[in-house]
Image (cartoon, rainbow, N blue to C red):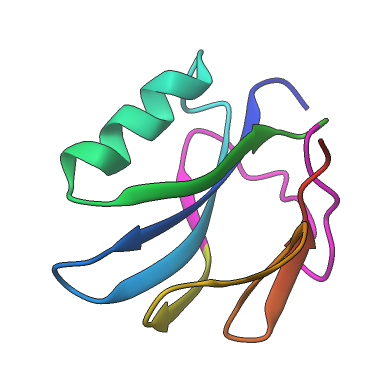
C-alpha cells in the first residue's frame, strides 16, 4: 500500500488520545503529522507501514481518508514498543 501511515496522538487540551491511519491521503508523513499538530495534538508515535505491526488493527484498503482506528479519554498507553488505545493495539518497529 502506497503512503500508508499510522499516528498515535494525544490532545492535552481535550484529554483525548487516538490512533489514526491514512492510506494515500498524504504524499509525505510530515504532512499528516502537521495536520494533527495544527489541531492541537501531540504526536506520540508515527510511521509508515514498514514501521509498525498491525496488531489487532488491520490496515484498510479505503484510501484518501483519515481513519480513526481507536480513541480514548486520556493519554494512550505505551508499554515498551506496544501502543494501546481503548483495547486496540499495535507494535512500533524500530
Looking at the image, is 24 positioned above or below residue 7?
above
Q: Could you tell me which residue is drawn at 18 percent across and 47 percent down? A: 39
Q: Could you tell me which residue is drawn at 46 percent across and 42 percent down? A: 65
Looking at the image, is 32 positioned above or below residue 44?
above
> Is residue 7 highlighted in magenta?
no
Q: Could you tell me which residue is drawn at 78 percent across and 27 percent down? A: 1
Per the picture, the main secondary structure of the magenta-coloured stretch is loop
Where residue 84 sits, quadrant-wise, is bottom right
Quarter of the rendering occupied by the C terminus: top right
User: Residue 7 at what x, y percent from top left?
Assistant: 53, 46
For this view, does 65 lie left or right of residue 48? Answer: left
Q: Nearer the viewer, residue 90 or 58?
A: 90
User: Residue 92 at what x, y percent from top left?
Assistant: 76, 48
Stretch in magenta: 51-68
Q: Could you tell me which residue is drawn at 80 percent across and 59 percent down? A: 58
Q: Nearer the viewer, residue 81 or 60?
A: 81
> Is residue 56 highlighted in magenta?
yes
Residue pushed farthest top? 27
Q: Nearer the viewer, residue 24 or 11?
A: 11
For this view, does 19 lie left or right of residue 48? Answer: left
User: Residue 70 at what x, y percent from top left?
Assistant: 54, 72
Amino acid at each position: 500500500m502506497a503512503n500508508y501511515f499510522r499516528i498515535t496522538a494525544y490532545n492535552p487540551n481535550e484529554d483525548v488520545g487516538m490512533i489514526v491511519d491514512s492510506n494515500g491521503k498524504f504524499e509525505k508523513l510530515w504532512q499528516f503529522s502537521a495536520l494533527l499538530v495544527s489541531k492541537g495534538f501531540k504526536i506520540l508515535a508515527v510511521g509508515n507501514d514498514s514501521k509498525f505491526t498491525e496488531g489487532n488493527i488491520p490496515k484498510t484498503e479505503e484510501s484518501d481518508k483519515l481513519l480513526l482506528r481507536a480513541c480514548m479519554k486520556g493519554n494512550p498507553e505505551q508499554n515498551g514498543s506496544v501502543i494501546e488505545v481503548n483495547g486496540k493495539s499495535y507494535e512500533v518497529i524500530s
